[in-house]
Image: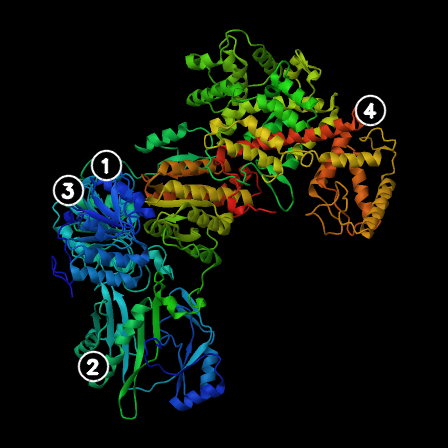
Amino acid sequence: MYQQGVGEFKYYVGISSLAQIATRHDRVCVLNILGGESSEVTPVGHAWSGGNVVFGTSPGRRGQVLETAAGNIPVYNSVREGLDDGHRFNCGVVYLPPSAARDGVAELIRVNPELKKIFIITEKIAVHDAREIRAMGQQHGIDIFGANCLGVADSWNQVRIGGALGGDSPSDTLKPGSIAVLSNSGGFTTTIAQYLRMAGWGTTTLVSSGKDVFIHYAAPEFAFALANDARSKAAVLYCEPGGYYERDAQFTKPVVACVVGRWKAKLTRAVGHAGAMAGGDDDAGAKERWFMEKFGVDAIYTPDNPVFSPKGAVVTNIAHIPAALTAVMRANATLPDFAPEGTMELKPWFGANMGIALPEKLDLPVVAAPEPYRAQIAALAKQVGAVFPREPMKDTSGASKMDPKTQVSSLNGTSVLEAARLPLEANVGLAMLREAGGENDRKLVNVALAAHMNLHGDPALAAAQAAREAGNAPNAVLAAALSIVGPKRAERARAIVAALIERFHEAGLRDALDEEFGVGGLTEDAALAELVLAGEPDPLAEAMLAGLDARAARSVFVRYLRSFGRPVNADAVLAAVTATLAWGPLMRKRVSRLSVETLPWWMKLFGALIGASADAAQHRPDGFCGIATATLLGEASITDVACRALLGRTPDAADRFAFQTLVGILLTNGPGTISAQGAKGAVSADGPESPQRVQLNKALVGFLTHTGYAHGGNGFEGVQFLIGQFRDTALADPADPAHGLDLAALARGYAEDYGRYKAEAKASGSADLQKIPGVNHPVFKDRPVNVDPREAFIRELMASRGEANVFHDYYRALVQALFDSGVSRTVYCVNIDAVIAALLLKLTWKPWRAGEFGETALESAAFTVFLYARMLGCAAEIDDHLNRGRNMDTRTAASACRFVS
Amino acid sequence: MRFADFPTPEVLGPDASEEAIKDLIERHGSVFVKPVFKGGVGKKGKAGLIGRAKDLKTALAEKERLYFVEHRHGNQVSKANGVTFEAAVPAEHEVYFSITDATQFRAPTMTLTHCGGMDIEELDPSKIARIPFDPLTGLKAFVVANALADIGAPKEIISPLVQQLPKLWELYHDFGMTTLELNPIRMRADRRGRLTPVACDFKCGFDRDDPRWHRLDLPAHLFAADYSDFEQEINQLRTHQGQSDVYVINERGTILAPTFGGGANSLVTEMLGDDAIISSDFGGNPPYEKMKSVAAICFKHWLAQSNVLFVIGGKSNNTDIFETFRAIADALREHFSRNGPTPLYVVVGRGGPNLVRGMGVMRDTCEALGLPYRLFGFDSAMSEVVDYAREVNEWMKTGGRDAIARKLGIAPVAA
């Protein structure tokens, strides 16, 4: 039934010494060599073992190769083809899936008469197949290892066959010594070798036996081969419950046996290792007893109660193996192979308390890892900022999302309703740095943007003005200006920010507002100085520095620029400002380095967009929109300035708040909106995988071209509707609660008119009913009284500030009137568009009434305020796509496109 | 049994009518009333869980007693659901027969004795034949014949058993079984005194990794004995690459420990005891997507009650730490995005390929989410790391959880 092998076994065993398990003479054929697992671990083992794999198989892939550091391994369709090509081998490694493993074993055995050893890595092989594999090996005199194992390794021969013992860098763990290892657990084979090494013990042969019901190379034959291996002085066995293998092993050398799994007695089914189940007399308790009898000890070895004999010790915790081994070996008058390489104490490689006071016992300080990990961690520490995995970002965003239930969108985790409470300058931070930032940040944003709004003498302004005069809508006008603000305009600032990040990170800067941080050493950096210094005083740089001074804005980087005591260029100041803004989010890995390096360009673009929205006449050498440059840079809030550019007059507090609210709620509506799609498409087309080439100004142009009279400009529909309702009233100030108008009557009148219109339209069979802008919503309907939560939020926000808006109130009266007069079956909601129209008209009512503002200007203003807001939302989208997207990822597959005729 | 064409007694199910039961008793003299358990439950006879009735009244009384009877074995409790009525086979000889893969012989092994009907452990070993045989040729008649001769079995039973028993090998081998046991086989005599073996109690275990038993078309509920929703969800991810074995240790535990490697699983589960929510092995280099799904399911079920997220394994050989940690970290981040923050302390102990990059991701995620953490390399003894996790858990129970909750800006919620 079986061939006669070595020793007195009742079955075939061919290996007489552990030294024969993995030798430098072994030649290996790997079945399914290109499989997921094999293709990762075979190259490492092959290179480490001096190139022991002669070929592999993968049906249908003949001619391919597996690349390794030690040369390519050829791949054949079958074993026979490889042999026909003149290759010879004595070891087969099986990486086939479970259902194919048995047939792979049969193939190896039948085709190659020189075969001696098979290593089966495959797990979850059916017991049925394992039975037959066993029988085939026995019949033909083949030693089989596994299955469900990680192969074998020999530290002396520096060979590993099959599997992955020692991981991706085997020499880190497998140092030659005197201890052999046999382990039911593949993972612990390496872990045990690591533990032994730290205690001064090297290894000879390591066998991961697997832990299926059938363990083909198990303890009895291991003990036999151990006895015949002159290199091995002792062995470590790691045993799990199940099987009588260990009971039958006769050891002649000292052994430390680690028996685990007593807890499994509690389980009712297998967890982890397949064969390991409770019940029966081969459980963990039984195995402990077997070993204790063999060793002549009466207890488990623990550090507190070290029980051992010269024959061995039993432990139940792998951490106790090294100490137990050392004790047993001392009893055999044997010292460790080399000086211990470390201790097993707790050594966190990374850790942080996140500002929480931990008890002393838990508050372990971070310890330097051993090489090569120390160097890797150091390299990791040099990595600044977040790194996002790239993936197709079509219709996908890491910046914005809309909650389908509430219809409230959020930008970088902040809902637009919350954003509506913030000034424009804070929303710049929210969009680009994912955080609205604090008081100091707002000062910095104000200076950075204000410095780039005045386009006097800039061709961008000429382009915008020409576009405006040619009758373009605001989006095209702004696009013309932004097309001029190309990459070259931001090149130097980008380089300076990159250099600042590099140098200041190296210098250990944590807090960019740190008044104590020493910048002295950095001024000696000639390369950096070259970048930031200006030969002549730069007026814009001076003005920005003065503005920062006037606002008492703090910044380590600005302090650094000043420490030169010489003129610096405006790009350097902008770079210093943006670096300060971004430092916190960058260090907290909220944003990527790439995002921060592009921030100066964004500031220039935002400034130019707001600037170009004002007529050319507003740009003067000494100021913008009637604000002197010094005031603009030293005092003004961007919210104010933008509002003024929009209205052409000085806004009051209520105007400012209405404007800020509008900008907040219009920031984004998720990645599905046309404007976002335009922005994302522009990035995708440039190829975000080469992010330095992506033209951010063009991406903003993409957003602008994807807005229009229907998207963005449609805010005007509501405005027009409201004008129609109020044109003939005596309304002077929409913010005055004592306006004296009977809104209910006004609404009733319209509702009745609309009711008549609807009835007539129905009677004439017209299906195309004109809707009332700002009323009803596809999601917020079907209740007796419907409310758009966004409208409710703004209403409450305004009420809490004591601000009235007659237009908003009118809308509320209108939905009630529509219901009362039977036009609607439920009370419709006042939707967010109505709120926007009401806010817009509130801003512009007085100039419109005074005849200063025509309908065109009104429409333009409505459109422009949308563009201001969406500029930030889309910039966030662009930045997100730049960081995460793939080239051309927004395209739609041809199969998903339709043709109509 | 039908598949192997092996004779069996007549059996009626729990919904058998009184007439049918009465008829069965009349024809066979008496019936056995046996409770129906899911999963394997042994030693029913010893536990008094088998009734024998010679009349309908007794049969019905036994039915009432055994219908929902509880069977306790160690700390496993099984509850019956229904009974069967089995025709008694009067016989002089009772035979015990089983096939299983014996690790002593590393071959399929037949165990056979003519002194069956009782616990085999209590028999004189000389009366028991334990014979390994070659799986490639199967259980052959001569193996049975020789075995019966060796243990001195009565002559008259040898021939019928030699004819019938080898059939059981086909059943065992071709339907993915790991054990098969017939006890007792009663030797029923026909009018001329010829004996036929009748299988009166049949037990078998199936190999989860072998699809052959699907051929039997057994109802799924037989196997879904008592899997929790959580275990069911994880089990659906069971594929060949990457393990996904889980077991709920304590539904009210406070340490959520995704564990990598069977060895680590043994160590960790043993040391954590009832602090652990689950015992798991997610090793075997799971791909990113699978690991993320597994982690997401773990978080969905257990994160809210967890004090410690404890990711632990040895120094892995081929499991890519970067991939698995990135998957866990992403799942954690997404869980927080969806459900808001929960107070948590993250402890990691691991080694293997791409370790530092993997730890980098864990670190970044913890910092982004505001969670305190300690990440240990493989140079810290795993058992020490487990102890550290336990100490953290104790601290969390006594104020730590509230402190983290305050820091995260959420109302403290008891674990």
In the rendered image, the residue lying farthest to the top is: A536
Q: Is residue A161 visible from the viewing direction of this image?
A: no
Mark 2 surroundings within 10 Å by alpha-carbon count, few (fewer than 14), some (14 through 19), many (20 or more): some
Residue of label 1? A340
Check the residue under mark 2 and report the chain it is in.
B
Q: Nearer the viewer, residue A714 or A147?
A: A714
The answer to whether mark 1 and mark 4 are in CB contact below 8 A is no
Its colouring scheme is rainbow
Q: CA distance from mark 1 to mark 4?
A: 91 Å
Q: Position of residue A135 (x, y in %)?
A: 21, 63
Residue of label 3? A334
Q: CA distance from mark 2 to mark 4?
A: 119 Å
Determine whether, in the image, residue A542 is placed left or right of residue B88: right
Mark 3 surroundings within 10 Å by alpha-carbon count, few (fewer than 14), some (14 through 19), many (20 or more): few
Same chain, labels 4 and 3? yes
In the rendered image, the residue lying farthest to the front is: A901
Same chain, labels 2 and 1? no
Q: Position of residue B37 (x, y in %)?
A: 42, 71
Same chain, labels 3 and 2? no
Quadrant of the image occupied by residue B4:
bottom left
The quadrant of the image that shows the N terminus of chain B is bottom left
The circle drawn on residue A851 is 4
Q: Position of residue A10 (x, y in %)?
A: 15, 63
Q: Reading the chain from its start, which is encountered first: label 1 or label 3?
A: 3
Depth check, mark 2 against mark 1: the one in front is 2
Same chain, labels 1 and 4? yes
The answer to whether mark 3 and mark 2 are in CB contact below 8 A is no
Mark 2 belongs to which amino acid? Ala
The circle drawn on residue B153 is 2
